[in-house]
Amino acid sequence: MKNKSRLKLLKFSLIHLLSLCLLISFVIPVFAVNNQVANTQVSVVGNKIEVEDGVMTGTVSVDNTTNGYSGRGYAAFKGEGDLTLTYQAPNAGLYEITVGYNSPFGSKKTELIVNGQGTGEISLAQSTGFQEVSAGKVQLQSGDNTVKINLGWGWYNIDYIIVTSAEVGGSHQVEKILSNPNATPETQALMNYLVDTYGNGIISGQQERHDADWIYDQTGKYPALLGLDMMDYSPSRVEHGTSSQTIEQALDWGQQGGIVQIHWHWNAPKDLLDEPGNEWWSGFYTRATTFDVAYALEHPDSEDYQLLLRDIDVISNQLKRLQDAHIPVIWRPLHEAEGGWFWWGTKGPEAYKELYRLMYDRMKNVHGLNNLIWVFNSESEEWYPGDDVVDIVTTDYYAPNGDYNPLVNKYDQLVSLVNGTKLVALAENGPIPDPDLLPLLGADWLYFMTWTGNSIRDGLQNDPQHLQKVYHSDYVITRDELPTDLYSYGLAPVAEVSYSKTGLTNQDVVATITTNKQVTITNNDGKSSYTFANNGSFTFEFVDQKGLEGTVVATVNNIDKIPPTLKVFSDKRKLTKNNHKLEEVAFSWEAEDSDSGIGSVKLVSVTSNEPDNGSGDGNTTGDIQGAEIGTSDNKILLRAERSGNGSGRVYTVTYEAVDHAGNKTQASATVSVPHNGQ
């Protein structure tokens, strides 16, 4: 995180440490409300509160037909109503609420309201007997506090709640390791930044570019994270004429220094109902298609399975455009499956997990998509596809209008799901959690992602004052506060080596490095170039401005400064007839070069120690004929004559061998015409 962000967080921490002390000392609750509760409600001092001591409304009533409850019975939630209990806290502070429940009709969700303020959903896993689940941490005031359980999905039983003192969550155990070991450098850099940010601030996020622009118009700040949708790339939508600018928007956002998050409302590959109320454009909803994902996965030879692959391939090809542009993506596929309202979740967790892993494998291993940070979107262990294919765990939650609670219970459930080893984020939200409360209650959400339209603009879910507070909070990271080296963040500097000559050469070679960020070279007298007089290697050492060290090795093996060896032979060393006639002489040679090899052997000259028409040589000219200089000519006509008063004639035939590095060697063979046939 850049220095400005660190200073903001330090300032924020000091201010809110003082705020927390004042909060406790003056016994001012974070969730201040009127604590009047109707009629027969009993204020309980002990930490376990039986439902019989509370007030029930609607059809919620005490029942005892299912065995295993404590006390005199349990509250059965059916068609309508709620349950309100009162707990008398000995001191103001942070507490954890645990709920004893039974959910025989499948997994359910409900909502906990403390002192009039929502704390988020509680997930009640299906159970045959009674068991406990944490409802998360809440800030309580000294004295009476109301705890209300809303109906939620209904058709479950509540036996009791347990209230215990709690502490803000401990340190994180998330490592800077992505599930994909082949992640691109930019993707690893983004992961480095996300891990460093986690618990030290929350990254602001907004779905859709037009809403991000609207936020800028209202606050003067852009969200750091832009949410986009691959929906209109779905082949069954394209068949109806849709087109999309999602990738173009992602390219633009990434190039402006922002972070990109993409999900996919995947229109079913086929079997769209396309009828009033369930039109083709609703094809991602379970209600709008009869496509059976479980059947497709069980029948890999079927058209249905092949269409799954087709759709994944289409989306992969689009995402590849971002990888080619060096832009990483926080990728959230197959979201909200647990709810069953999307076709990819309607056949249960096993089919969902198989589809998730199929997509992961195909995108990674078939398409080579290494720029994705993979997001799982549920709190359910039953639906979790595995640590090896997940980088971030998330939930979607839309609190009531103006309810800015930090959703501690949701956060803690996700931390528990992955034993604290994965990043935890809020992938969709309506009201934005109050940034003042997040660090105080240990809700270390990595980012929020406010949904499009009314969720951000209507002034009800997020009122104008709250929006200003969020986007100007020291704890909230906006786009202008992201590091300028976001896509090389935390990476050791790397360098590329270029060479003055790459082919075989008999000259010195200069190796020069170019780094991906500003560095100081700590050897080679600080120079970025090194001259090789001979083959060998040299290691450049350097360090960036953050102290991260890097090295790169320059290796040269193309220098050859040793000339080749050459020997020349002729098939006639003497022309003894001395008959003034031309005789053909054939030449051969042996050329060797152990380094770069022989490139060519060519004739460079044919000379005579006597003139062409010397005294007493028969008055002839053209004594050397057929010699093609500059070629590999090896047959030459030499005249068998010599001057009458000389010591004998000597022809010298010279060849030159050149190796592939340009080194040259010359060698000659002689042919003599002696006196008197000697």
Image (cartoon, helix red, strand yellow):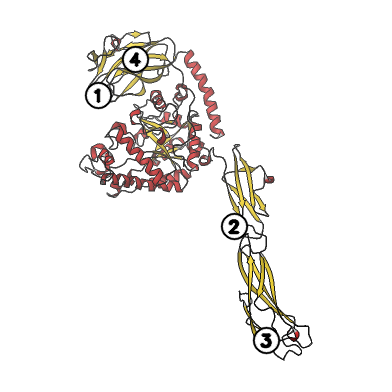
Going by the numbered disc 4, the residue's amino acid type is Ile
**Which is more toward the observer, 577 or 480?**
577
Q: Which residue is mark 1?
A: 105
Q: Which residue is mark 2?
A: 502
> How many neighbours does mark 1 have within 10 angstroms: few (below 14), some (14-19), or many (20 or more)?
few
Q: Which residue is mark 4?
A: 161
Visible in this render: residue 257?
no
Under circle 4, the secondary element is: strand
Q: Compare marks 4 and 3 and give the one earlier in the sequence.
A: 4
Q: CA distance from mark 2 to mark 4?
A: 75 Å
Q: Compare marks 2 and 1 and give the one earlier in the sequence.
A: 1
Q: Compare marks 4 and 1 and give the one earlier in the sequence.
A: 1
Question: Does the CB distance between marks 4 and 3 fall below 8 Å?
Answer: no
For image coordinates 22% across by 14% down, the residue present is: 65
Q: Which residue is mark 3?
A: 622
Under circle 1, the secondary element is: loop
**Which is more toward the observer, 322 or 670?**
670
Q: For the residues carrying marks 4 and 3, which lies nearer the camera in this image?
A: 3
Under circle 3, the secondary element is: loop
Question: Does the CB distance between marks 4 and 1 fall below 8 Å?
Answer: no
Going by the numbered disc 1, the residue's amino acid type is Phe
Q: Name the residue at the left extreme.
A: 275
**Which is more toward the observer, 564 or 40?**
564
Quadrant in which the C terminus is drawn: bottom right
Q: CA distance from mark 2 to mark 1?
A: 73 Å
Q: CA distance from mark 2 to mark 3?
A: 47 Å
